[in-house]
Amino acid sequence: MDKHPDPTLLASFGRGLLPRRRNRDIVRHLLAQCESCCRMIAARALPPFRRGKTKESLRFTYDAAFAQAWQETERRQAALSAERSEAPELLRELMAQPADRRWTLATAGPRYHTWAFCELVLDAARELGFQDPSRAVDLSRLGVEIAGHLDAVFYGEARVNDLRARAWAGLGNAHRIRSDFRPAEEAFAKAERLLRKGTGDPLEKAHWLLLKSSLRGNQQRFREAFRLLDRVVAIGRKHTDGQLCGKALIMRGFLVGVANDPEAAIRYLAAGIRKVDPIFDPRLFMVAQHNLVLYLTESGHHQEALRLLESARPLYHQVGDQMGLLRLRWMEGKIATALGHFPAAEEILRGVRKELLERDLGFDAALLSLDLARIYAEQGRSAEMLRLAEEMIPMFQSRDIHREAFAALLVFQKAAEMERVTLGLIRNVSNYLQETRSARGLRSRESR
Amino acid sequence: MATLDHPELRESLNILLKNARPRLERVLRNFEIPPEDAEDILQDAQLTLLYKWDKIRSPESWLVGTIKKKCIMYWRKRRGSLCEAVDTAILDLLAVPQAPAQERAELTCDLNRVLSRLSSRCRSLLKLRYGLGYGPTEVAEQMGYRTSSIRKVTNRCLAALTRQLLAVGFDREPEGEPQDG
């Protein structure tokens, strides 16, 4: 056997750092079965579960590694805190600009290209998604652009790819809310590609899976949606993240509700609500409670729905967005109708409908009109029913609405003209409108 | 979770890292990560934790899980570099022109001894690669693999070859991956 290679050469070989000629000599030596050299390389290049533990590792001390890692973390933490304290003012400044100027400023100005600012834009876009979907798309696009400008050397390439993936997933979700499925699909695909180049953080993946399941739900591809949610639950369990499991259950509740199974929706929503912490995500908690109240009402559990609504009321005010408060009043109107308190219900629903129309939310206003129609049907007020049916058509005509949904409304109008509107017909038209909304991705019931 | 300001975040991180340190150290030791490389692993995981602090519900279990995953990736990378070095070296050794006949015969004999310990599938694949000088596409054709999957199969066989090459340095069968704690 040739003489043994120098131990430093063996160490470099184990790390794949030697020039080819040296590699060749060492491999030739190893092929001749040199036990000591094989052991030395195995210890450096094969994991312990492949070769058995070495005695050398018992002497490892990690004090310096921990100290140095903390030093760098502390330095970065100070920089990140500085970014975070500047970010809100930067966002205010930027949002005060006209849209085109905003874009120019954000793309050209390096002071906007920080992690904290990017996160703030993404969070703001997510919040806007529930109130102003068009602006949410614009802001999400800005988030994607800013994420694209982040310094990958400073923040770390894999981490930046995670944030870029989050930005694209947010944009995909904003498109979903606006019913634009094709751009939503493209954005989610882009996010998935970026995740593959990211840190491999399972929580980041779970976030993407949750949003994607929502898209699949809106597309009525429920089986796929549930498979995605199963993966979220698996990640949540593995990382003892109850919040994540709760989110997945709540999303499942939304989806089975859309799929017309209110009893299952109640079960999943109630289970999800038990797991999520309202302090961590008050909006999720509020939306979940809202949907639970809705399905309890629809399943005839009116008293329970009322009790839950009362206990959830402070949360609506705490979250404080106008759409949430409007939906709270709509729900009060629904429950009052179900309990037979017609004058109060009519007053509430009329007020909410007026506000929905002022916000240009014609589809919601038409759906709410069907709740009013229930009251008129119960009281035999056919003249008001006819007037209501006539008012509903222009709400739909003014926008790009699914043809079948429009046809359903025409059937309703015809029945009103013939004084043949029944509670069954109202329920069918209402369900049909809800389904076409989901199928086309028209903004679904508060789903996230 | 609300975004924490500077001193609060620093304090929370500091407490978390102090509490998690015994578990983290155990993971590093189980995976036998050399201290000089442990710093990179720790730092990278801690920075990711810092940037995602607001999104992570159970930071300690997230951190331990992330460090474990990074340890696995660390060894996978090391093993990958080693396999690549072994493969290139064998190809170079076989390509040396006009090597004395005896040297060549000894090399073939030594190589065949290692190959004989591999599965028949890997043995056939590596014989095509080393014995007949086939490229990946030709190997795929000969063995009936799809071109898209041949790289993965070759890498697995190279990993097995490397393990067998070094096997005289350790005398135990591979176990499952180590568990934390």
Image (cartoon, rainbow, N blue to C red):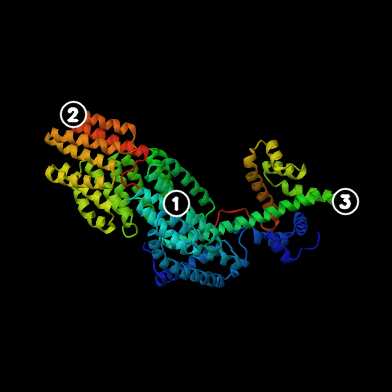
Residue that mark 3 sits on? B100
Q: CA distance from mark 3 to mark 2?
A: 104 Å
Q: CA distance from mark 3 to mark 1?
A: 67 Å
> At x 16% / y 28%, what residue is drawn?
A419
Q: Nearer the viewer, residue A70 or A80?
A: A80
- Estimate how packed mark 3 is, as few (under 14), some (14 to 19) or many (20 or more) residues with alpha carbons within 10 Å: few
- Estimate how packed mark 1 is, as few (under 14), some (14 to 19) or many (20 or more) residues with alpha carbons within 10 Å: many
Quarter-wise, where is residue B143 in the image?
top right
- Estimate how packed mark 2 is, as few (under 14), some (14 to 19) or many (20 or more) residues with alpha carbons within 10 Å: some
Q: Chain of mark 3?
A: B
The mark found on residue A362 in the picture is: none
Residue A386 vertical placement versus A124 (above, below): above
Q: Nearer the viewer, residue A342 or A280?
A: A342
Q: CA distance from mark 1 to mark 2?
A: 47 Å
Residue that mark 1 sits on? A141
Residue B57 vertical placement versus B99 (above, below): below
> At x 36% / y 37%, what residue is drawn?
A439
